[in-house]
Image (cartoon, grey):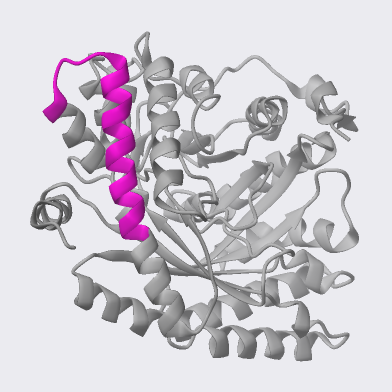
Amino acid sequence: MLNTGDILQTVRMIREENLDIRTVTMGISLFDCISDDPMRLEAKIYDKITRSAKNLVSVCEDLERTYGIPIVNKRISVTPISYLGTTLPPENYVRLALTLERAAAALGVNFIGGFSAHVQKGMILGAQNLMEAIPEALATTEHVCSSINVATTKAGINMDAVAKMGEVVMQTARRTAERDSIGCAKLVVFANIPEDNPFMAGAVHGIGESDTVINVGVSGPGVVAAAIREVGDCDFSTLADTVKKVAFKITRVGQLIAYEASRRLGVPYGIVDLSLAPTPAAGDSVAEILENMGLARTGTHGTTAALALLNDAVKKGGVMASSHVGGLSGAFIPVSEDRGMIDAVRAGTLCLDKLEAMTAVCSVGLDMIAIPGDVEPETVSAIIADEISIGVINNKTTAVRVIPVIGKGVGETVEFGGLLGYAPIMPVHRESAVSFIRRGGRIPAPIHSLRN
């Protein structure tokens, strides 16, 4: 039986606390598009995507009207493109990115992810050429997102790939310098990449997935912040229980939309990703959650402990609400997309080193961080290596999405717009890591990876 109180509470969450479905993402396998003829490959990819997702946007819009729940983004993820082109040169990979762009534009989706490669142990020719193509591909498209998995707990860290991605990030920044290097906002480097993640820029359709699938990413940091504010001065057990109960309700909303989208599209339901994804809007901040727990400012001593409690409680509440939780599922801490994080950076309590420490206990990693545009590629590689190491050692997903803003320096602000928000440019350590990065080879997998 429907509970009137629960209904009214959900309405309040939507109207006053920024509850929304952050994304409905359709995953599409492109393996049946493989062809020796590059032109034929492009045509088959375009046809498969546009045929499979032709009703995605209209169904999501109808669900918004039916349930009154905002669905902020409609997205597509595809099979990592490096597996499809294998022997194609970089210029043909750029053409494949343009094919993805045409499909996304035709369908009216916000983003399409999967211009991607998995290189944790080595780089096949297709992966090498795709990586070479990334700067041009992201500079000439608006909707295409790229991700590269450079490490797993089982394989260790491919430091040759890490070194290469430092160069790729800088090249992408330069290719989009006239737009504040925004190409880098569509590029993320992973350890232990999940193959059912609905969030960009890291969404890919994993090789173990069905032909098509619907994955839903929920949000709701404003809802959690309000619940913590309402419960007041309680002990930590009560605080954790409060977060769990709210996470349960948020996830149930996501599962409802996932089931209905799946049914109406005739596509299998995959997972609900219950990540708390902030926006630049007031009251929709993960930093505000931490500050409502009692921190004067995010980044001060105690921040990592508060974030650990939040992340764990969100996961516990979410898994009780849905049997199929996946993706990243936790709390995101992007800088540019979270007004409270931005304020903490400006106040001086939050720096790159503290953010790195916080990623040991939350979802993803160093996300949407603007840094000076005059950094060395090896410095970017070293930032990637540090963050990826946290994921490998702790057997969790971590990632890096940093944006070297060409022509700007520490203290200046960069505007990305929309959900990507704005960010103060943060300082990096200027002491060189060149000799370390240029060693090459692989950092071996940790001993606890030997579980067979």
Instruction: Return the x and y of residue 48 as percentages of the image width and height.
Output: 63, 87
Q: Nearer the viewer, residue 359 or 126?
A: 359
Say if 56 sits above or below 338 in the image.
Answer: below
Residue lying furthest front? 1
Q: Nearer the viewer, residue 320 or 132?
A: 320
Q: Residue at x 87, y 27 (%)?
A: 444
Say if 58 sits above or below 253 in the image.
Answer: below
Q: Main secondary structure of the magenta part?
A: helix
| Magenta extent | 230-254
Residue lying furthest top? 301
Q: Nearer the viewer, residue 146 or 237?
A: 237
Query: Is residue 234 shown in magenta?
Result: yes
Q: Residue at x 59, y 83 (%)?
A: 49
Say if 278 sits above or below 62 in the image.
Answer: above
Instruction: Return the x and y of residue 406 as percentages of the image width and height.
Output: 50, 42
Whether residue 117 can be seen here: yes
Whether residue 331 can be seen here: no
Position of residue 196 in the picture relative to residue 246 (left or right): right
Position of residue 108 in the picture relative to residue 20 (left or right): right
Position of residue 105 in the picture relative to residue 29 (left or right): left
Instruction: Return the x and y of residue 26 as percentages of the image width and height.
Output: 52, 72
Query: Is residue 26 shown in magenta?
Result: no
Quadrant into which the C terminus falls: top right
